[in-house]
Image (cartoon, rainbow, N blue to C red):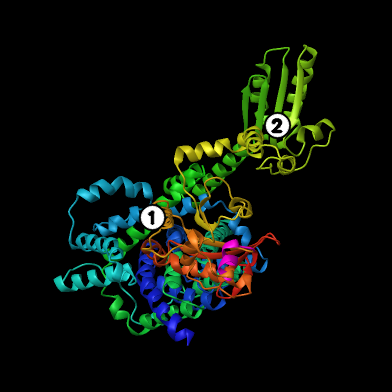
């Protein structure tokens, strides 16, 4: 029943997307178009059947186009097929060795920079084909010849390509028809246009007998180390792209999380089979996978069936595919390539100060080749990491010097200059807020302290946490970095409260003294760039519930709405304050998640269970739309209340549209105060978040 209701329709949607993309990727790779279709069939059936990420759909990917094109140019079609098959064996070994998550250690900025560079290379080459010319052998040559190609004579092919791009860009704006894949619509409409006007253009050419036209692999006639580099490149890039896609797909559904090691074995098996049949390399593809989830797929049957449909088309209805003009496929690839350059990712990396890594990788891939570009990106990432690890903030206010961050020998020169600038003979306080101190930096401070004391001054070294300087004084350095306290001294706050002092003023003083130096650079960046929170967090106003504490989040991470009972009034009600916050978070800030969080011991839920509420509290609780009067199971009432608020959220058009477009996820949570533990609220009941 689930197969007929969910997976069968989803498989048709994915099949319709996969056909034009597989043909276009094969054309851009310089491979026979049949090779792209073989990879799509094998990716669907083999990878789908063995996959550790059941809802992920595999097939030929744009991210490998540049690599495959270079491999075919060097080793030929049969040699490339052999390399793909061996790369699959390497992936199987990596998966069996349980190294699936190790591939994710590669910086995402490097991966996305690599994909952006590949996308630009694809677009630069295919735009020549779209305009009726021929793609050159390098991105630089394509860029150099592009102006002449643009101003040159353009025939019917260029018209068909421009029409294809127009349909690709305009079709998603038609909300009622957006579920039909834009690539399919563009190919069908423009192919029909070409047939109607009798366009004399190059079209898809498939062999009459596909099974007899399979290219069998042959070991390349080249040095073993060169072949090894090609194998490792395809295996590594295919693995990273597949695993990143699997992790991304996990965020799109509520089912079991992906088994990345099993997924790596599945991708390896698919690549080995694809190579043996003369197909292109296979990876998990986020475009097809996200469409699969959005179309309602529930099991791996959808991915498998989409491969079956492609095989049926190739074997029985190849004539339909041969009506497609190559300029149409080139236009599809231009759009696909440019979409690999994500402005949202660029903004994210700029916000997290990783944009140099992204740009260096992308520029390296475009200007040189993929391996050189990735190596340059990795080098940039390492240099940025070392710079951040060795970075410290130094502030001097009167006779107080505050040093925050990581203090290593490379930063000791700045420390020495700041300390030596102090006038002699004063009572100096050196405040250390350090998560790391090495011996070289310690020696600089200690030598200065001894010299300053001898000159008639005094030095008081204070440490907020961990005692790095004290341990160094005892000759016991050597531990790794630590995490500084973000909220000052908790015991000090408790003592102040117990002694009935002015806790608010004391807390502010403690923040400005010990916490502010640590968070000021981050807050300054938020003040400069504006807020860009990851999610809207709707929770109760209960004073025992501290959102940033229970989510270990910091400034700028959560956009919070708190009220009695974490209530979300339905759209259109008389209270618009909550609705304004929701529309601002989704429509302006672009949050990707809305979480409604209830908690144990909720006074609002207990009031509803007691019944008979009047006044402002009673009027407010009616918006919960739950009648808990007489109920005795408090936990169930709290979780039912969370579920009701999630339903109320979906009455807001901005929420409903974002969720249907795959840009927004709604989640429910329950926090047990006594256990200090968070649970996910879903149709299966309560589950610890750590296992979700």
The quadrant of the rendering that contains the C terminus is: bottom right
Secondary element at image label 1: helix
Residue 434: x and y in percent read: 69, 36
Q: Which mark is residue 432?
A: 2
Q: Is residue 113 above or below residue 458?
A: below
| Residue 157, quarter of the rendered image | bottom left
| Residue at the spot 66% in from the left edge and 30% down from the top edge | 403
Residue 672: x and y in percent read: 66, 63
| Residue at the spot 51% in from the left edge and 50% down from the top edge | 109
Secondary element at image label 2: strand
Q: Main secondary structure of the magenta part?
A: helix
Which contiguous range is marked in magenta?
601-609
Residue 593: x and y in percent read: 49, 59
| Residue 235, quarter of the rendered image | bottom right
Q: Is residue 562 visible?
A: yes
Closer to the chain start, of discs 1 and 2, is 2
Residue 607: say if magenta. yes
According to the image, label 1 marks what residue?
A: 587
Task: Report the Cα–Cα distance between label 1 and label 2.
Answer: 43 Å
Residue 206: x and y in percent read: 33, 75
Closer-to-camera residue (351/105): 351
Q: Is residue 418 above or below residue 241?
A: above
| Residue 500, quarter of the rendered image | top right
Relative to residue 197, is residue 228 drawn left or right?
right
């Amino acid at each position: 029943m689930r197969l007929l209701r969910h997976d069968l329709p989803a498989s048709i949607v994915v099949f319709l997307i996969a056909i034009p993309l597989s043909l276009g990727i094969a054309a851009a790779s310089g491979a026979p178009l049949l090779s792209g279709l073989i990879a799509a069939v094998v990716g669907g059936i083999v990878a789908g059947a063995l996959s550790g990420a059941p809802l992920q759909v595999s097939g030929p990917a744009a991210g490998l186009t540049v690599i495959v094109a270079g491999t075919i140019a060097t080793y030929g079609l049969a040699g490339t097929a052999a390399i793909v098959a061996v790369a699959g064996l390497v992936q199987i070994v990596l998966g069996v060795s349980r190294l699936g998550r190790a591939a994710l250690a590669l910086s995402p900025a490097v991966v996305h920079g690599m994909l952006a560079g590949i996308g630009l290379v694809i677009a630069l080459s295919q735009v020549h084909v779209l305009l009726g010319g021929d793609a050159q052998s390098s991105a630089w040559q394509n860029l150099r010849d592009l102006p002449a190609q643009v101003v040159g004579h353009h025939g019917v092919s260029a018209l068909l390509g421009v029409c294809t791009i127009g349909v690709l860009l305009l079709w998603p704006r038609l909300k009622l028809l957006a579920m039909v894949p834009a690539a399919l619509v563009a190919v069908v409409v423009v192919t029909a246009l070409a047939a109607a006007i009798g366009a004399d253009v190059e079209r898809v050419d498939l062999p009459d007998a596909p099974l007899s036209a399979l290219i069998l692999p042959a070991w390349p006639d080249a040095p073993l180390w060169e072949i090894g580099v090609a194998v490792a490149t395809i295996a590594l890039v295919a693995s990273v792209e597949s695993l990143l896609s699997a992790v991304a797909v996990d965020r799109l559904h509520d089912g079991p999380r992906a088994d990345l090691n099993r997924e790596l074995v599945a991708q390896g098996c698919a690549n080995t089979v694809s190579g043996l049949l003369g197909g292109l390399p296979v990876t998990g593809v986020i475009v097809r996978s996200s469409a699969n989830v959005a179309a309602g797929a529930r099991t791996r049957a959808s991915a498998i069936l989409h491969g079956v449909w492609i095989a049926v088309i190739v074997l029985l209805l190849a004539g339909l595919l041969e009506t497609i003009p190559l300029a149409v496929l080139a236009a599809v690839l231009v759009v696909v390539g440019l979409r690999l350059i994500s402005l949202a990712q660029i903004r994210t990396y700029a916000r997290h100060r990783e944009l140099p890594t992204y740009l260096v990788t992308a520029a390296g891939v475009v200007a040189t080749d993929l391996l050189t570009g990735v190596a340059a990106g990795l080098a940039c990432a390492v240099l940025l990491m070392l710079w951040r690890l060795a970075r410290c903030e130094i502030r001097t206010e009167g006779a107080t010097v505050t040093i925050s961050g990581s203090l290593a020998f490379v930063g000791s020169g700045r420390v020495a200059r700041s300390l030596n600038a102090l006038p002699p003979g004063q009572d100096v306080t050196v405040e250390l807020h350090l998560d790391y101190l090495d011996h070289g930096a310690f020696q600089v401070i200690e030598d200065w302290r001894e010299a300053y004391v001898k000159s008639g001054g005094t030095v008081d070294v204070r440490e907020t946490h961990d005692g790095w300087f004290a341990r160094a004084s005892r000759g016991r350095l050597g531990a790794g970095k630590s995490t500084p306290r973000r909220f000052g001294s908790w015991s000090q706050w408790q003592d102040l409260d117990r002694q009935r002092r002015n806790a608010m003023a004391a807390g502010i003083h403690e923040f400005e003294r010990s916490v502010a130096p640590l968070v000021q650079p981050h807050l300054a960046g938020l003040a400069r760039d504006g807020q860009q929170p990851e999610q809207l967090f709707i929770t109760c106003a209960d004073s025992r519930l501290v959102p940033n504490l229970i989510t270990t989040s910091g400034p700028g991470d959560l956009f919070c709405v708190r009220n009695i009972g974490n209530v979300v009034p339905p759209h259109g009600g008389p209270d618009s304050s909550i609705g304004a916050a929701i529309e601002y978070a989704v429509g302006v800030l672009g949050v990707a998640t809305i979480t409604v969080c209830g908690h144990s011991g909720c006074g609002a839920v207990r009031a509803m269970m007691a019944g008979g509420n009047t006044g402002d509290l009673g009027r407010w609780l009616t918006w919960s739309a739950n009648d808990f009067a007489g109920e005795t199971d408090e936990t169930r009432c709290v979780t039912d209340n969370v579920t009701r608020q999630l339903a109320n959220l979906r009455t807001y058009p901005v929420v409903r549209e974002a969720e249907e477009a795959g840009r927004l996820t709604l989640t429910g949570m329950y926090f047990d105060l006594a256990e200090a533990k968070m649970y996910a609220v879903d149709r299966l009941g309560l589950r610890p978040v750590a296992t979700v």
